[in-house]
Amino acid sequence: MLQVSFIGAVNWSAISVKPGDWVDLLSSTLSSGPFYEIMATSGIAILAGFAVVLLIDAVISPSGTGWIYIGTTARTLYGLAADGHLPNSFLKLNRYRVPSWATIAALVLGLLFLLPFPTWYAITTFVTTTTVFTYIISGPALMTLRKTAPNANRPIKLPAASIIGAIATIAAFLIVYWSTFYYLWFAIALILAGLPLFFMYTMVNRYGASKPATVASSIVYWVVLILTTYFLIYLPFAAPTGWPSSSPVTMLKLKPIHIIDFVAYVIVMAALTIGLTLYVASTAKDRENAMKHVRAGWWVVATIFSALVLSFLGSFSVFETPIIPFPWDTVIAALAALVLYLYGSYSGILTEDLVVALREMGGV
């Protein structure tokens, strides 16, 4: 009903847009706040008054979601620290038993999202992309649990799990792919930026990796990631298209230099990700266990770079004429997701954490 009321309420002459030209609404005054603008310019007193109420509500209503997400993120950071993936300072509780530094960190991280994105649309697109990235893990995780803990206590057993897991993985991967290269490059850069935390805390706390080696590797990784992302992605692809506006202002004409820049970025970052991970693992006291977990996680690295490469090549890139046209790009992305699902399911292993969790749930 909201959609129907909006379509019927658009006053084309008032917004200086050709009647029926829905695409140009993105560049009109309606793009900043569709219902508010329609009510405010309707000429009807009661609607103009309600527009003010709507504006106030737009500030107050999301606060509930904001509090929930800050709390959820704080508890997530606390849990990561408890498992040795983050500094112990995140474990500090205040007198209300709330993780203080984890809550502050969650707030700061939330505020940082406002810096590169000028519109709510851009923020939600980016957040959706990074969130759905985590959903890709669900399908292989399900099959790994079926494989490594076949006798676990299961009050509810999902039928046709392998098929549902495959569909879920493909769906999540496609949502990430469809988010467009315009947003995906930045999301992946931030995901990769988290790898040094794995070096400095998980590798050190769980497997006894050398602290000097992990710190040095982390610094090198961050420096190279920043430089390559800026010079090989942002300058040739993002800046010319108008990033970080809500959508590309200008689509690019594909040139050989674009392919060279992108291939160089993928090769450098993939080699650095694999190389430094292997190096840090080689310094671990429990090297065998560290390498076992690293090998089980390579499919995640493959997923990240597959999404980036396909996004660059397909119809959701930043080029006027994509290298792989629609719908073949989506078909290829779906097939790639299926392969990644099989790879992830095959490489999954039984971990000590899973054994402990299964015991707490009533045995294996």
Image (cartoon, rainbow, N blue to C red):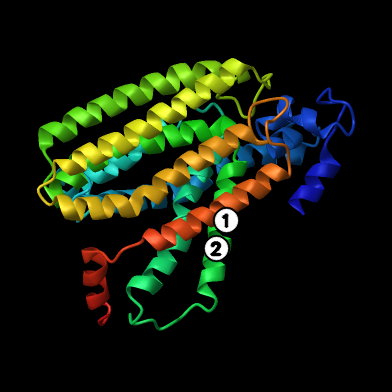
Give 298 or 155, whichever is nearer the viewer.
298
Residue 270's spot in the image, x, y percent? Answer: 39, 34
Q: Which residue is mark 1?
A: 170
Say which amino acid is labelled 2.
Ala
User: Where, by quadrant of the figure, is residue 203 drawn?
Assistant: top left
Q: Amino acid at mark 1?
A: Ile
Q: Name the residue nearer the viewer: 247 or 336.
A: 336
Q: Residue furthest right?
A: 19
Residue found 74% across the figure and 37% down from its top: 39
> For this view, does 4 lie left or right of residue 214?
right
Mark 2, residue position? 166
Q: Residues within 10 Å of mark 1 (few under 14, many from 20)?
A: many
Residue 355 x %, y %: 23, 71
Q: Secondary structure at mark 1?
A: helix
Residue at figure coordinates x 22%, y 77% from the top left: 359
Rendered view: 175 above or below 362: above
Query: Residue 36: x, y in percent?
Result: 69, 36
